[in-house]
Amino acid sequence: MYKEYRGGAARRPAGLNPTPFDPAPNNGPLQFPAAGLLVSESAAENGGEPSNKRKRTNIPPADGVRNLNAESSPMGLPMSDLAAWATAMNNLGMALMGMSGKPLLPDFDPALGMMTGIPPVNPMMPGLGIVPPPIPPDMPAVKEIIHCKSCTLFPPNPNLPPPATRERPPGCKTVFVGGLPENGTEQIIVEVFEQCGEIIAIRKSKKNFCHIRFAEEFMVDKALYLSGYRIRLGSSTDKKDTGRLHVDFAQARDDLYEWECKQRMLAREERHRRRMEEERFCPPSPPPVVHYSDHECSIVAEKLKDESKFLEAVQTLVTWIERGEVNRRSANNFYSMIQSANSHVRRLMNEKAAHEKEMEEAKEKFKLALAGILVQFEQIVAVYHSASKQKAWDHFTKAQRKNISVWCKQAEEIRNIQNDELMGIRREEEMEMSDDEIEDPSETKETEESALISQAEALKEENDSLRWQLDAYRNEVELLKQEQGKANRDEDTTRDQQLKLLQQALQGMQQHLLKLQDEYKKREAELEKVKEDKVQMEKLLETLKEQREDEEDKERDATDIPGNESSAYRICAASQEKECPLERTLSCSPVKSEREALLVGIISTFLHVHPFGASIEYICSYLQRLDTKICPTEVEVLMSRLQHTFRQELSGVGASLEKRWKFCGFDGLKMT
């Protein structure tokens, strides 16, 4: 805190050292010859007036910088006089700081001064007249009276809290202004708010409020600064000529639309920027390959012979071959180009051998350099070991001994690592030498192998040429097949149609055959029924004949045998006659086995549950659950033999005609 004293001069506290200058009685700005400018205080005390009342001069600020006064009397203290500055700062209890922020007196003790607790002062700090002090962010801005042509704006009470505002809409350029005077006009609104920026539109209401739309978004913040001001039209004190402004954000569709357009534009720019970045980092696309022609073929053949253009020409040749440009007419040209490409194999092998030789030389150099480095490391370690001996070790301090031991350990570790690396290189060389000895025991074998390799290469070339010719012939054969295939496609389509028609005809015939088979089976069943009926009729006729013969015999016997004997004989004969037809009827019954009897019982119970009848398939599906060997024809024949037990009926009309079997055992019992 800076204290102000009444009167013309400030009293010096006791215990301070005298300084070559005394700024208190002057109350003027301090002048530094190096800067060449004078700075005046904004709030100066009365310097020359006898009155005790202080006067405050309102100096309008210019861009936040205090006025610079060039007419004040200079102070005779240069910046280079460090003794005077040190004395003054020591009296204030503050350390003297240089232009770079470092203390000029390193041994300064702030406890020696009177005013302790004050941070060190730098000549470039704000408040010393060279750099303006920055405004703290927490400090509220001081609002002043604003004079307009037809109205005056009075600031609100600074102790009151700031006016509340709603959440700012995106892209807001429109503000709501309330609390306008009743007599306020649109011209007065323009006069007040045109200071904030360019106004595009004003929409005024009859209820003392309006909406103002600015050209830019930052102008809205300037307009919000006027919120809370009291407005007075002219010098009138009438209630209709006064009001308290309330400025707040307003939500407008035009602002939102412009903001969305801007966001879309920014998004497009961002996408374009990312696309450009991706294209910049993407590898460049290969150049397009020209189509094959005799002229281009000659150019590529010349390039294949040149070492500098060989890679480009080989890529073109590979593309042509993959495209299928090789045919009988161009096979010789391609063969010559392939042969010229093969001629570069020897050159590449020579280059590889040269590079291997260079690599071996570089390995030798690296090995020699590493050996020299190891020798130097050994010497450094020897120095540390000699320094660690008793004669020299006692003369070093504790810190020096610690450093020497640490350095010695580091040097030994590095030496061991380098030594291991050198030994590994030597082992690899020994392994390579042993492999070479195993593979190449003598020079004679090398010559023989080289001759064999040359012969093998010649055979490979001939084999490749024959293979390429074979591929060319194959391609021509495929082309001929394709041409023939195009001609045969029409025939194939007609054949396919004919095959389809034949297949349909066969399917129809198969269906017809199935129907005939079903009818044949039905006819066979009917024939079997007729035969069985015929057999039964014959049996019945035989039984009737036998009965007649027996009756005739009985009559004859009755006449011959008199009395009781004749009657007993008649009774025995009658009983025998009665038993014989029963046995005969049992022997000729329609149920021939116990299995058929069981089937009859099961079918009768099933049909008794279904009074409306059931088809033969339905009955067989039920019986097949009990025995899978049962077939529909067997069941149908059995049921057709028992006419008094089961009856077949036809139901439906036309295509829905269906045969159903019903149980009629109770009716048959009554009839028999």
Image (tube, rainbow, N blue to C red):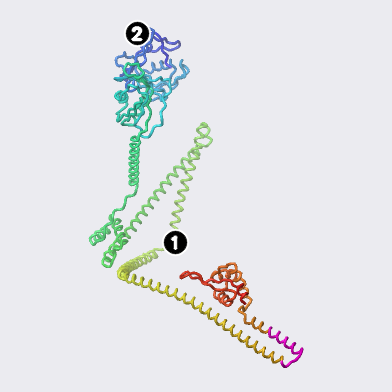
Instruction: Tell me if 109 is positioned left or right of 661 in this view.
Output: left
First to last magenta residue range: 559-578
Q: Which residue corresponds to the image point at 43% horizontal and 47% vertical from the top-left? A: 371
Q: Most extreme residue toward the top, as rendered?
A: 50
| Residue 569, magenta (yes or no) | yes
What residue does disc 2 label? 48
What residue does disc 1 label? 438
Element carrying mark 2:
loop
Percent of width and height locating residue 437: 43, 60
Percent of width and height locating residue 183: 32, 21
Residue count near mark 2 (Cα–Cα under 10 Å), binned few <14, some 14–19, many ≥20? few
In this orientation, which residue lies closer to the viewer: 560 or 502?
A: 560
In this orientation, which residue lies closer to the viewer: 350 or 411?
A: 350
In this orientation, which residue lies closer to the viewer: 301 or 500?
A: 500
| Residue 425, magenta (yes or no) | no
Percent of width and height locating residue 10: 40, 10
Element carrying mark 1:
helix
Q: Which mark is residue 417?
A: none
Q: Which residue corresponds to the image point at 45% horizontal and 53% vertical from the top-left? A: 428
Among the two numbered marks 2 and 1 on one chain, the one whose residue lies closer to the N terminus: 2
Tell me the quarter of the image containing the N terminus.
top left
Task: Indicate the amino acid at tag 1.
Answer: Ile
